[in-house]
Image (tube, helix red, strand yellow):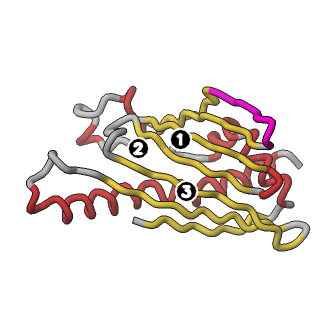
Amino acid sequence: MEITVTTMIPFPIDDVYLALQDHLPELAQYMPNIENITIEKREEHADGWLHVLNRWQTAPTEIPKVAKPFIDRDKTYWFDHAKWHRPSYKCNWHLEMSFMPDRIECQGTTSFHRKTDQQTEMRITGSLHINLKGMVPRILLRRASSGVEKFIGRLVQPNFQKTAEAITSYLESQK
């Protein structure tokens, strides 16, 4: 499944880029479905790339009531492996889910584009693939994988939109 989200943020490109790269934990307060974001590791490399590992913890409200007895609250997070390159205003990333990490592959690029001095376009492109081989009967594999991808996609894609809204709220609070 392909993921594409394009949003306009009413702030200069450097402000937007640095807010997402350097202030992600502070952005969590503007995302109602995220409890917190923790920077696990941050490494600057001589080649101009910055590698950051973030842990995103979902808010308890995101677990449906009917599923709460079956879902371990400690497993409702994911890791965001991000490689930032400021000269190109780009971030390559991949997500590592706490559940089924060997079966869910989600990766992509976030790029930032100056539209005006006070407006930045943020483009997120990526892909989400689920491998249910061995979990469902072979005859149902394609249909089940597609259904689960669409379900997870409906959860992931709005988070990208909410991230753009959080950047705007965060930058407005910094004025």
Residue range of the region highlighted in magenta in the rendering: 41-47
Question: Could you tell which of marks 3 and 2 lies nearer the N-terminus?
Answer: 2
For the residues labelled 1 and 3, the Cα–Cα distance comes to 20 Å
Question: Could you tell which of marks 2 and 1 lies nearer the N-terminus?
Answer: 1
Give the number of the disc on residue 8.
none
| Secondary structure found at label 3 | strand
- Where is residue 132? Give x, y as percent: 22, 50
Asked if residue 141 is among those painted magenta in the image, a careful observer would answer no
Q: Which kind of residue does numbered mark 2 sit on?
A: Glu
The residue labelled by disc 2 is 62
Q: Which kind of residue does numbered mark 3 sit on?
A: Gly
Q: Is residue 39 left or right of residue 156?
A: right
Closest to the camera, between mark 1 and mark 3, is 3
| Secondary structure found at label 2 | helix
The residue labelled by disc 1 is 34
For the residues labelled 2 and 1, the Cα–Cα distance comes to 8 Å
Residue sitting at x 83%, y 54%: 87
- Where is residue 104? Give x, y as percent: 36, 47
Quarter residue 53 falls in: top right
- Where is residue 168? Give x, y as percent: 74, 56
The residue labelled by disc 3 is 108
Whether 98 is drawn above or below 11: the answer is above
